[in-house]
Amino acid sequence: MFDNPFSMVVAIILIVTIGKVVQARHRAHRDDAGTGFSPARNEGAAEAENRHLREELKAMKDRLAVLERIATENNDSGARLDREIDRLRDRS
């Protein structure tokens, strides 16, 4: 059967292809998304990321409010502006 090099190459390609198909089916069976992670672990990570993003959004809104107040004030007090900017720098 494997008396010439061509048939040997075809056999190797066939074996590798079958192995890849079995491996892909195993991964798809293990997780529908194909990621290999369980949904419970993904939910925990997503919740932590959401919490972090909400905190960051709140901090950005606070900073924006301060900057809007600074921009709309009619005072030319440089010292107050410096204090506000320093306070914003200390927050981050």
Image (cartoon, grey):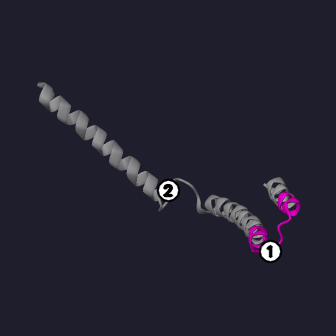
Q: Residue at x 69, y 63 (%)?
A: 53
Q: Position of residue 24 (x, y in %)?
A: 39, 51
- Position above or below: 80 against 11: below
For marks 1 and 2 on the same chain, the one whose residue lies earlier in the sequence: 2
Q: Position of residue 29 (x, y in %)?
A: 45, 58
Residue designated by label 2: 30
Q: Which residue lies furthest to the front in this view?
A: 76
Q: Residue at x 50, y 56 (%)?
A: 30
Q: Which residue is drawn at 88% across and 59% down?
A: 79
The picture quadrant where one finds residue 70 is bottom right
Q: Which residue is more in the foreground, 68 or 79? A: 79
Q: What residue type is labelled 2?
A: Arg
Residue designated by label 1: 74
Q: Position of residue 38 (x, y in %)?
A: 58, 58
Horizontal side, residue 46 vs residue 59: left or right: left
Q: What stretch is highlighted in magenta?
A: 66-82
Assign the C terminus to one quadrant of the image.
bottom right
Q: Residue at x 45, y 52 (%)?
A: 27
Horizontal side, residue 86 vs residue 37: left or right: right
Q: Which residue is more in the foreground, 81 or 12? A: 81
Residue 33 within the segment the image draws in magenta:
no
Q: What element carries label 2?
A: helix
The picture quadrant where one finds residue 58 is bottom right
